[in-house]
Amino acid sequence: MNHVKDFNFSGKKTLIRVDFNVPLDKQTFAVTDDTRLRAALKTIHKILNDGGSVILMSHLGRPKNGPEEKYSLKHIVAYLSSLLQKDVKFVTDCIGDEVRSAAENLKPGEVLLLENLRFHPEEEKGDETFARQLSELGDVYVNDAFGTAHRAHASTTIIANYFDAQHKMFGFLMAAEVEAAGKVLHDHEKPFTAIIGGAKVSDKILILEKLIEKADNIIVGGGMAYTFIKAMGGKVGNSLCEEDRLENALQLIEKAKSMQVSFLLPDDSIIADKFDNAANIKSANSNDIPDGWMGLDIGTNAIQQFTDVILRSKTILWNGPMGVFEMENFSKGTIEIAHAVAKATAAGAYTLVGGGDSVAAVNKFGLADQVSYVSTGGGAMLEFFEGKVLPGVAAIAAAK
Ligand code: 3PG
Ligand code: MG
């Protein structure tokens, strides 16, 4: 498979699909988390250092009907310019005459950012004409947008048809993401432990199905744990529970049992009488939560039990927090699990953290550089671990 590291970009205009779908402040539109911008720098620098020029294209948010101020990529121009230490040029569309001439006039060492691709509905439809118009802006196509690799959109997938095998390739980020995820799913050292959290079971059923076939231990925390606990006959009070998923939950527990995979749920929980940091709080057995109370974090015994398993593991995948870590009183479970994952890493385990909330958690606790790899992909990472082929990866991987 082609990789930017093996290509000389001298004199070439390179069209890079990046995932600059970054969170912006609602009032000021300032970038509030620059992880995805930083993650793209290595590829951009390589191309510029070779003597090439760069045309960046991305989506931002989910605009419905054409341009929307809050989704304009102009909001990131200043920030990106400061990261690159050069003035990034910007055009107010991604196709059309103005864009074509800006691309044509781009000189080696220069960077041009196009306006949000999703301002054209053709992007999400995977429209061929739109993809061809984009492709005409560059001599080479690089896909570095792992976060969007699960979308078969014009700029992530269809566009690859308009470049020959020598002129389409993965950027550093895409290659690193695919390698990290592939190592965990297909080439891991055992014991392999998957830690899956978050609010909803319904989002995680497919990944759990797949991971039960691969992992030695599955640790389940967060709001989704209570659907499993209720399915097994526990009393969960007012905790989050997806009644229509009780059957799925039981099937997963059965599948784990039949495959001799240990499936761990939190023995105890921190419970609260309302969804509020200032609520009344106590600890309880997770299967005996009184009415009017809800589980908002894993408890002390669960932390201990999960930590023991994590420290015995050689490979760890973590997706989803253990509780409502944004509220201080319910953050201990997620903090302690993050520390356990960091400790396992220091002891030689390979650890991959992915999914918006768990990544936000390791960043918040300052542990991002103490795990093996932090993914920029949420949905893309989930779909990879569900065993799906990511269209954005396949479009390049097919090139010899
Ligand atoms: C994401 O943040 O999930 C990616 O940028 C993809 O965005 P989407 O979920 O709106 O397709
Ligand atoms: Mg998404």
Image: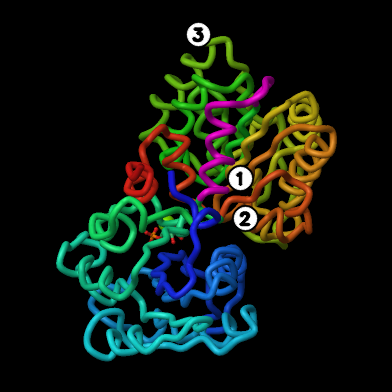
Question: The residue under label 3 is which amino acid type?
Answer: Ser
Asked whether, in this view, residue 5 is left or right of residue 299, the answer is left
Q: Are marks 2 and 3 in contact (CB under 8 Å)?
A: no
x 84%, y 39%: residue: 346
The tag earlier along the polypeptide, 1 or 2, is: 2
Residue topped by disc 2: 274
Question: The residue under label 1 is which amino acid type?
Answer: Met
Q: Position of residue 223 (x, y in %)?
A: 56, 43
The tag earlier along the polypeptide, 2 or 3, is: 3
Which residues, given as a range, are shown in magenta?
A: 175-192
Question: The residue under label 2 is which amino acid type?
Answer: Lys
Q: Secondary structure at mark 3?
A: helix
Q: Nearer the viewer, residue 297 or 121?
A: 121
Residue topped by disc 3: 258
Specify whether residue 28 is in view: no
Q: Secondary structure at mark 2?
A: loop
Q: Which mark is residue 294?
A: 1
CA–CA distance between discs 2 and 3?
A: 38 Å
Residue 115's place in the image compared with 400, above or below, is below
Quadrant including the N terminus: top left
Q: Are marks 1 and 2 in contact (CB under 8 Å)?
A: yes
Crowding around mark 3 (Cα neighbors within 10 Å: few <14, some 14 to 19, many 20+) is few
Q: Position of residue 355 (x, y in %)?
A: 55, 50
